[in-house]
Amino acid sequence: MSDQVLDRVNDQVLDDTSLVRLRGVRKRFGPLEVLKGIDMDVREGEVTCLLGPSGSGKSTLLRCINHLESINGGKIYVDGELVGYREKNGELYEMHPRAVAKQRRKIGMVFQRFNLFPHKTSIENIMEAPLGVARRPRAEVRKEAFELLEKVGLSEWANHYPAQLSGGQQQRIAIARALAMKPKIMLFDEPTSALDPELVGDVLEVMRDLAQAGTTMVVVTHEIGFARSAADTVVFMDDGVVVESGSPDDVFDNPQSDRTKGFLDSVL
């Protein structure tokens, strides 16, 4: 795996103000190409929402940003660093998993399913990575974990186990856990899709608070209201390509593509 050669891609001019830069990103699963040359920039402190039908490549793109999926072409940079690959003699080679894991410390990710450790309490889940991965002092980590619990509105649930929490509460703990590593960017993969409708609002409120605080975020979502109110950039994807991108007003009120118009008509 560490010697896998990535397809070559010609570098385009890179936007130095962008925290995340994707250039010509391609991803195949066997003969199926699910990402077909994606170019995208995410600036520090901004929120980008990815919209599109199921199977359009949104979640795969998110997983490629933190190298949970290796890519077959193009380049991804986070904070100026090439993600998942090293360059040698003009060729790109996949990095050792330990090196990739170190890069992932800059990237927090919240999944559709909460993936909390069932045998650990809320606060223990939040403390796990700062203690086990970052090797930080326990007292300092515990103090910050309580602060994160307060930030997501669950300070009274610190000693409860996941099975004692609602789905919405578990997802808020998952957000706090991702924030505990102080990432440069937060990735959200349809974070409310597994929740009962009455639980969605609390999770979106936490995400809006993060956005207002200047957290850099890339969010795959079907929550159009959230995208309209919280996003700086909305990206509409279909069939592995970026069909349209722009401000929420541009995309929602004046879409240029017929495909975008058809999608919005079906969900609004």
Image: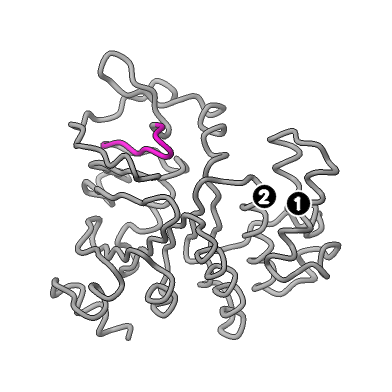
> What numbered label is drawn on residue 144?
1
Q: Amino acid at mark 2?
A: Ala
Q: Which residues are magenta?
A: 73-81
Q: Amino acid at mark 1?
A: Glu
Q: Position of residue 83 (x, y in %)?
A: 41, 34
Residue found at x 32% / y 57%: 57
Circle 2/circle 1 CB separation < 8 Å: yes
> What numbered label is drawn on residue 86?
none
Residue toward you, 40 or 241: 40
Q: CA distance from mark 2 to mark 1?
A: 8 Å
Tell me if residue 109 is in the magenta stretch. Answer: no
In the picture, residue 18 is in which quadrant? Answer: top left
Q: Main secondary structure of the magenta part?
A: strand
Residue tagged 2: 180
The correct choice, above or below, for 53 with respect to 104 in the image is below
Q: Residues within 10 Å of mark 2 (few under 14, many from 20)?
A: many
Residue found at x 36% / y 23%: 93
Q: Secondary structure at mark 2?
A: loop
The correct choice, above or below, for 93 with respect to 122 in the image is above
The outermost residue toward the top is 89
Residue found at x 27% / y 66%: 236
Q: Position of residue 265 (x, y in %)?
A: 25, 85
Q: Position of residue 234 (x, y in %)?
A: 32, 66
Q: Position of residue 235 (x, y in %)?
A: 29, 63
